[in-house]
Image (spheres, rainbow, N blue to C red):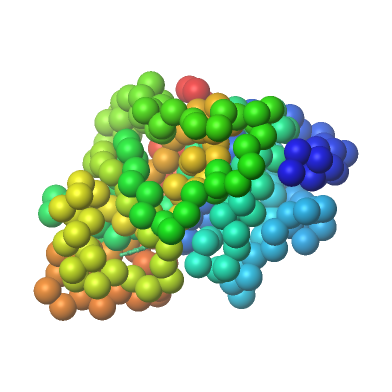
Amino acid sequence: MLQKIQETTKFIKSNTKYNPEIGIILGTGLGGLVNEIENAEIIEYKDIPNFPVSTVKGHHGRLIFGMLGGREVLAMQGRFHYYEGYEMQLLAFPIRVMKNLGIDRLLVSNAAGGMNPKFKVGDIMFINDHINLMPGNPLIGPNDDEIGPRFPDMGEPYEHSTLALAKEIAAELNIPVHEGVYAAVSGPTFETPAEYRYMRTIGADAVGMSTVPEVIVARHAGMHVFALSVITDLGGMEEVAPVSHEEVIEAANKSEPLMTAIIKELLKRL
Ligand code: HPA
């Protein structure tokens, strides 16, 4: 694994002039932020040795290097989901490469279903903790002590100080935000009514099909994490509420500018 990470890192380093400190992964319908990256350099996943390639038709699969909020960033346009059939370990790979490139901070967004009765479609929730309900963990398997410890602490998966700063920024920008717990499921099915009730009961405010594997791997490697969800449906609360992929994308697109404004300002002040 370490050898593959090093090989991929070497390739990437020889293909960009940037030395980013901050990595960004954007969720479904939330990719607009990448258009704001200045002086961008792009590397396609398919050209990167050892890199997974997105299976979802029409999804971009590329790394974008450049300047955002005055900082050097690396954004992944197109993320990998467990439901696409990837091994959990493969989901971990891009994060490990980021770390090897010198990135010690990860910003993540996702589209999620809201279960907290205070939430409305289009709301933003800063993630303050998570529950991993996926049938696995990306750290299962032999541990490489050079990357991180066998039994990593998960006491503060989402850095408190960054969360506090993001709340300050949202207040200054007059963007109302919630804070809550994100439950990660495998998908690709959306939840049954009983599953939504179950997740609400165990303490989750939102549910989605991503983010947690990446965050686990990032924390394992000692990276600082900030993550937010855009609430794209209220599966848990509406009597008759079929959830569709189209609805998720439409809601995410609408809230995207607000999320972008928060992340840009956060980058300036981190
Ligand atoms: N459930 C799971 N994943 C999701 C949802 C949901 O309701 N909405 C967006 N991603």
Left or right position of 109 against 128: right
Task: Give x and y (percent) for residue 38.
Answer: 66, 41
Q: Given the current orientation, which residue lies at the most extreme front position?
A: 142
Q: Quadrant of residue 144?
A: top right
Q: Nearer the viewer, residue 96 or 261?
A: 96
Report the residue at 36% width, 55% height from top: 133
Task: Give x and y (percent) for residue 246.
Answer: 40, 74
Query: What number of labels is visible?
Result: 0
Q: Given the current orientation, which residue lies at the most extreme right position?
A: 14
Report the residue at 50% width, 67% height from top: 83
Q: Quadrant of ligand 1?
A: bottom left
Tell me: residue 36, above or below residue 29: above
Q: Dividing the image into 4 quarters, which one contains the N terminus?
A: top right
Task: Give x and y (percent) for residue 30.
Answer: 47, 55
Task: Give x and y (percent) for residue 26.
Answer: 52, 51
Tell me: residue 179, above or below residue 31: above
Report the residue at 43% width, 71% height from top: 188
Residue 48 is at least partly visible in this image: yes
Residue 253 is at least partly visible in this image: no
Tell me: residue 249, above or below residue 96: below
Q: Quadrant of residue 55?
A: bottom right
Left or right position of 72 against 151: right
Report the residue at 65% width, 29% height from top: 145
Left or right position of 112 against 101: left
